[in-house]
Image (cartoon, rainbow, N blue to C red):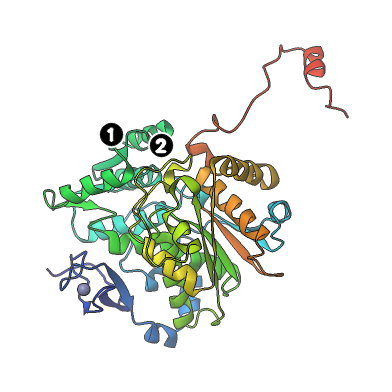
Amino acid sequence: MTLTVERNPALLGVRCRACGVLQPADERYVCGECLGPIEPEYDTGSLAQGDLRATIEAGPQTLWRYAPLLPCRPAAGQWPVGMTPLVPAPHLGAAIGVPGLMIKDDTRNLTLSFKDRPVAVASARAVELGLTTLACASTGNLAGAVAAAAARLGLPAYVFVPADTEPSKIMGAASYGAAVVRVNGTYDQVNRLCGRLVDELPGWGFVNFTLRPYYAEGSKTMLFEIAEQLGWRLPDHVVIPVGSGALLTRTATAAAQLVATGLVPDVPMRISAAQPAGCAPVTDAILDGMRAVRPVREARTIARSLAIGAPADGDGSVAIVKRTGGSAASVNDDEVMDGCELAARTEGISVEPAGGVVVAAARAMARRGVFKDGECVVLYLTGNGYKQGHGDTVTLAPPIAPDADDFRAAYPEARP
Ligand SMILES: [Zn+2]
C-alpha cells in the first residue's frame, strides 16, 4: 500500500521489540515476522545534525511541535492537544516531604486527561490509513478522548468500557456522540473482546490495538514537553501512574530520543512507578524483585483508570524502573483519597484518583528515602478530578438560609 500523505523523513520504519527486525511503517501493527510488538524508529543521528531545537521551538503550541519525533503528521482540523503546564509545587512538596517537587499538569488537556496525547497521534494515523471508524477499549479516560477526536474528525466512534466505569466518564464519552458499549466484565475482558473484533472490522481503527504502535508514541510527548519546559534538560526523577504501562515505557523512549538527538544533556533520569494496592502488578513485581508481572484477576481500587490487571507494557515497565534506578509504591484507597485531597488543598489542582495514587506513592517513597536532596522530581498528574465527580471524596456542610445571622452561626470561625 502506497501512502500519499506527507511522511516524516526521519521515520526509518518500525522495529520489533521481540525479534529486532526493522520493517516498513505500512499498515502493519504487529511484527510481520513474529507478531511481536513493534515501535517506530527514527534516524536520530540525522536529526541531531540539524537544528532540531529551533524547529521545535518554532512549531505550534501543541504536541505536534515534536513532529520530527512522531510517526505521522497531524490530520486537518484536529483539536490542539498538549503543551500543558509544568509548575513547581512547593506546598505539596512540603506536605509529602519532596522539596524539589514539580507537577506536570495533564488534568487540563483537551478532554481533561493525558489520553488526548496518544489519541491525537492514533487518530492522525487513522486518517492517514483511510480508516472509517475509531474504537477503543477503555477504563474511562480513553473513551472520552477517542469520542471527542472522532467527533472532530467526522468519524463514528465505538468505545468499549467495563459497565462499572464511573457514570460521568461514560456520559462524557456518549455526549460526543460515541456509541458507548458497556461490557459486564473487567477491563482485561473488555480488552480481549476488542482483540477478537479487530479481525471482523478491518476498516476500524482500534486505537489501542491496530493503531497501538502509533498511539503509544503520543505518550512520549509528556516528557518532551517537560524537558523543553525545564530549559532543555531532563528532570532527575519522574513518578508515573501505571495502567497499561505505555506511558512509563514511552517516557523512557522519549528520554533516550531527547539524548540521542542532542536536545538534552545525557544525564540519568530515574523513573518510578505508582499503582493502587488493589491493582498493583507492576509495583509488586518491582518491589518483590521479579522480572515479570503476575496478572491481577480482579482489580479492586477506587483508581479505576489504573485497574488493568494484565498490563500490555507491564514487564517493560518493570525493566525500565530497575534499569533507571527508580523505585515503586502501591497505596490503598484511603491513601489515594488523601493524595487527591492534598493536591487540591495545597496546590489548587483537582485530580482524579490516579493522581491521588501518584501523590500518595511519592509520599510513601519519600518516607523510604527514595528521593535525594535537591532532586527535581516531577509527578505526572494525568486525569482531572472533575471527570469522576467529587461525591466520594468531599463532605459538605448543610446549606444555610439566605441570612447573615445564619451564616455567622454556621461559620463562627469566619472573622475579618
Ligand atoms: Zn518480530
Vertically, is 183 above or below 66? above
- In the picture, which quadrant includes the N terminus? bottom left
Badge 1 crowding class, 10 Å Cα cut-off, few under 14, some 14 to 19, many 20 or more, is few
- In the picture, which quadrant includes the C terminus? top right
> Which residue is pictured at 71% across the width and 14% down the height?
400
Q: Amino acid at mark 2?
A: Lys
> Which residue is pictured at 43% across the width and 48% down the height?
279
Vertically, is 315 above or below 84? below
Residue 75 visible? The answer is no
Badge 2 crowding class, 10 Å Cα cut-off, few under 14, some 14 to 19, many 20 or more, is many
Residue 250 coordinates in the image, percent (x, y): 41, 66
Q: Nearer the viewer, residue 300 or 174?
A: 300
Q: Earlier in the sequence, mark 2 or mark 1?
A: 2
Vertically, is 314 above or below 267? above
Query: In the image, is the residue at mark 1 within 8 Å of ligand 1 by its beta carbon?
Result: no
- Cα separation, mark 2 vs mark 1, equals 16 Å
Q: Which mark is in front, 2 or 1?
A: 1
Residue 317 coordinates in the image, percent (x, y): 42, 64
Residue 257 visible? The answer is yes
Q: Nearer the viewer, residue 86 or 55?
A: 86
Question: Which residue corresponds to mark 1?
Answer: 184
Disc 1 is placed on an element classified as loop
Question: Which residue corresponds to mark 2?
Answer: 169
Vertically, is 52 above or below 110? below
Left or right: 272 in relation to 215 = right
- Indicate which quadrant contains ligand 1: bottom left
Q: Amino acid at mark 1?
A: Asn
> Which residue is pictured at 60% across the width and 69% down the height?
230
